[in-house]
Amino acid sequence: MAESIQEIKQKLQAATYHELPELFQLYEQDERSGVKQAIEKAKKHLTAYQKEVERTATLWQYEKQYAAYSYICGIDEVGRGPLAGPVVAGAVILPKNCDILYINDSKKLSEKKREELYDIIMDKAVAVGLGFSTPERIDEINILQATYEAMREAVSKLEVTPDLLLNDAVTIPELSMKQIPIIKGDAKSISIGAASIVAKVTRDRLMVQYDSIFPEYGFASNKGYGAQAHIEALKKYGPCPIHRKSFITHFC
């Protein structure tokens, strides 16, 4: 008895990407339109997957170039531009045989995809470190120096000491290990991309928590950036304790 269209669809949906070509061969002579549509859909998914595998392979160029180093750490920060909230730095050491797909500059990913990748990175990484610089510290020493402090803290929190740092565009003062600054590194290095995702998700979650404490400013949606509604609330209510005073002189 021939398999139903629904049964074939379920097989295609349940198959791994490695199993799909064999199923395509098995059912390619089936003339039913529902089967043909299911196969066409599965082929599109497989093509997209193969393109992602190829794209991800290019993100390993620096990690492969410096493969002689035992522990390569990607570093990135999130939150230099907002009017409120901390700067958060992420430091991530991935295993050399890591197979995570879809890592990219965190700004290019949806919130849902960042959250998914955050869990995968935290599970598979050799080590993850986070560093924070408060609004008070940003006002005290300026945003650049505060960012460097957060990055140094992130490195210090790693359970494994890296011997090479891949940084997004900067060289961090006061660190002894070798550093490689890479322009737009979060879109070119898998380690920096992973660090940007960890830092972004961590900071966004913090800002959602702050929203429950200071609901007037819409931090859950604007994450402290200068959205129009945020600026209007700042003018109406004045600053709250997590605003960066040095960033809001034009508004209040």
Image: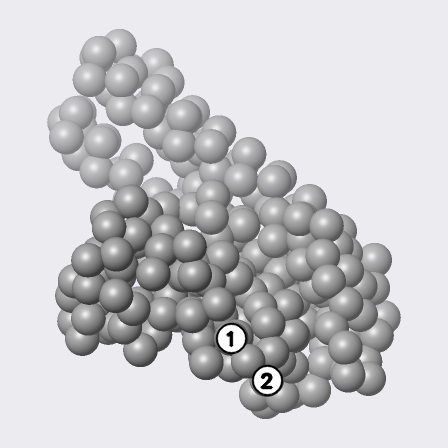
Q: CA distance from mark 2 to mark 1?
A: 18 Å
In screen coordinates, is 69 left or right of 46? right
At label 2, the amino acid type is Glu
Q: Are marks 2 and 1 in contact (CB under 8 Å)?
A: no
In screen coordinates, is 111 left or right of 209? right
Q: Secondary structure at mark 2?
A: helix
The one nearer the camera, 72 or 38, is: 72
Quarter of the view holding residue 160? bottom right
For the point 29% across and 45% down, the residue is 228
What x and y, as percent, mark residue 14?
A: 29, 44
Give the answer, above or below, for where 160 lies relative to 21.
below
The one nearer the camera, 236 or 3, is: 236
For the point 61% across and 40% down, the residue is 55
Assign the N terminus to one quadrant of the image. Answer: top left
**Precedes in sequence: disc 2 or disc 1:** 1
Q: Nearer the viewer, mark 2 or mark 1?
A: 1
For the point 25% across and 56% down, the residue is 235
What x and y, as percent, mark residue 90?
A: 54, 71
At label 1, the amino acid type is Asp
What x and y, as percent, mark residue 63?
A: 74, 60
- Crowding around mark 2 (Cα neighbors within 10 Å: few <14, some 14 to 19, many 20+) is many
Residue assigned mark 1: 139
Quarter of the view holding residue 164? bottom right
The answer to whether any part of residue 159 appears in the image is yes
Assign the C terminus to one quadrant of the image. Answer: bottom left
For the point 22% across and 11% down, the residue is 33
- Crowding around mark 1 (Cα neighbors within 10 Å: few <14, some 14 to 19, many 20+) is some
Residue assigned mark 2: 153
